[in-house]
Structures are given as C-alpha cells and as structure tokens.
Image (cartoon, helix red, strand yellow):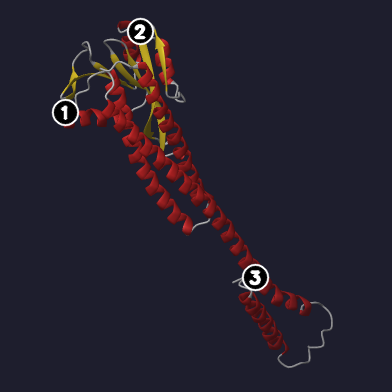
Amino acid sequence: MRTYLYCEAGFVEKPQWQPNCWINVECPDADDLRFLTQELEVPESFLNDIADVDERPRTETEDNWLLTILRIPMQSSQNGTPFTTVPIGIITNNEIIISVCYYRTEIMPDFINYTRRKGLKVNNKLDLILRLIYSSAVWFLKYLKQINNDVTAAEKALERSIRNEDLLQLMKLQKTLVYFNTSIRGNEVMIGRLKSIFQQPEYLDEELLEDVITELKQAYNTVNIYSDILTGTMDAFASIISNNVNTIMKRMTSISIILMVPTLIASFYGMNVNVHLDQVPHAFALIVLFSIGLSAMAFVIFRKIKWF
C-alpha cells in the first residue's frame, strides 16, 4: 500500500504523486513494485536489499539515486519474541523521496500524525531521514519500557516456580535487547555517514541533528542498562532454580529414608524364620511403636541438619 504525502503543516495525504512529494510504501504488493520500478525507475536492487530482513543500516548510491537503510522496532510474535527490528529504506534523488518497508509498523502512522499535530515543516530529504531516526529512537524507548514490565512479571513468576519456561521467557527478552542494541548502534553510525553525504549548509539542521543524537544515545544507554540487569537476573534465577531443585531432592530423599526404617523392620519380621517374639504379648504393637520411634528420630535428625 502506498500513500502520497506532501508537507504543508505536517504531512498531508494527496490523491496522486507530485514533485517533492513523499511516497510512503508499506507492505508493497505487485502494483506498488511496478509503480516504483517502471514509472519512477527506482533501481530494483534497492527494493531487494530492503526486503532482506537481516539488512544492516547503510547507504548505497546508483546513478542519481541514494538508498538509506535504517532499522526500526516493531512488535512480533515469531518464536515468542515480543519485539524485533526490521529494515526501512529511504530512496531519494533530486525530486523524489520514497520510504519502503515490507512490514506494517506503528512508527509510520504515529510519525505522520505527530507532524500534523505539531505542524512540522520538513525542509528537505535529510530532515525527513533524521526525523524518522528520531521517531525510531522514541519507539525503541517505548518498547523498552514494555520489556522492563515483562521482565518484572517474569521475575515474579520465577519466584514461585522452577519451570524452564519462565527462564526461557527471560532469554527471549534478552534476545530482543540484542536486536535493539545492534539496530540503535547501526542507526547511530548512519548519522555520521549522512553528514558526510549532505555537506551543503542548506541541508543540515544542527539543532535537529543534536536532538536525534541525544535521543539515540538515551535509547542505546537504556538498552545496555536493561541488558546488564537482565543478564544478572537470569544468572541469579538460574542459580535459584537449581537450588530449589536441590532442596526438593533433599526433602524427597529424607522422606524416603524415614519411610524406609519401618519398611526395613517390617521386612525382617515378615520373614519365615523364628524371631522369638511370637509369644510376647502385644508384640505387633511394640514393633509398630519401635518403628515409629525410629522414624521420628530420623525426622528430628533431618530437621537439625535442615533437610526439612
């Protein structure tokens, strides 16, 4: 699906393309790809690169076209991972600005609505790229807050559980943080490349550039803090789970030993041999009491050594 957006007081949708119009393409179908490659003559190799889910942030030029690939966050349900990052490509030349993403995300609609609410004026293609990087950093921070809440919930579950599933949930969250870390770092490196490409004074807004760098650094530092906390939490809970298993095994062993004492005595007196107690009055009751006494003694000993 493609939309044509023209910047007036924020981005306003237009019914058809016009020069200096931003073309936003999400989940492109065959008609969108035909429009880009045949009518606008966008290099097909650019679209193939953007379609690669593992594509890293980078820039590439071909003829008078410039491709800028960024990584943006999105919610995901693949393999139980709550969030992931996907590539978005910004393809530009002298008159055309195109953004292509093969996934539907929350960032683009939010960014467009934000420009309308604030009445932002995007002066050139570098401004648009920088504002998209800024928006991605904001969404990284939003998703990091949700990840922090998920970590807290998983910690509470682990406090009263020894299941591997709860620890695996933390591992998936840690995997998400690795995705975020590499993507934020890649977007940060892209800013230096863009500064070297757009060296003309009319392109570069120093104040906007400083805001983008600050927001990216905040997102990067937050990811690292959460990652360190999560790593320590996983190590601690892995030890707790192992200790809980050991405690359960000690208790089960203690119970087995306590029950083994009367079983052993009953086995001896159940043999078909002379035990010299067949003439003693209340021999059965005495044997039972003796067995209970030995079991009670074993219980007291295990309590003292804290096996119960």
Instruction: Confirm whether residue 50 shows in the render.
Output: yes
Q: Is residue 155 above or below residue 300?
A: above
Residue 137 at x, y percent in the picture: 34, 34
Q: Are marks 3 and 2 in contact (CB under 8 Å)?
A: no
* Residue type at the position of mark 3: Ser
Q: Which circle, 3 or 2, is nearer the viewer?
A: 2
Taking the image as shown, residue 203 lies to the left or right of residue 298, namely left
Instruction: Confirm whether residue 106 shows in the render.
Output: no
Residue 92 at x, y percent in the picture: 32, 14
Residue 283 at x, y percent in the picture: 73, 89
Label 1 belongs to which residue? 119
Whole-number angstrom distance, CA of label 1 to CA of label 3: 73 Å
Quadrant the C terminus occupies: bottom right
Question: Which residue is drawn at the image coordinates 39% and 24% (left, top)?
Answer: 192
Whole-number angstrom distance, CA of label 1 to CA of label 2: 31 Å
The residue lying toward the viewer, choosing from 284 and 252, is 252
Residue 271 at x, y percent in the picture: 80, 77
The residue lying toward the viewer, choosing from 86 and 225, is 225
Label 3 belongs to which residue? 254
Quadrant the N terminus occupies: top left
Which picture quadrant has residue 306? bottom right
Question: Which residue is drawn at the image coordinates 62% and 63% (left, top)?
Answer: 249
Question: Which residue is drawn at the image coordinates 66% and 67% (left, top)?
Answer: 253
Taking the image as shown, residue 237 lies to the left or right of residue 195, namely right
* Residue type at the position of mark 2: Asn
Within 10 Å of disc 3 (Cα), the crowding (few <14, some 14-19, many 20+) is some
Label 2 belongs to which residue? 64
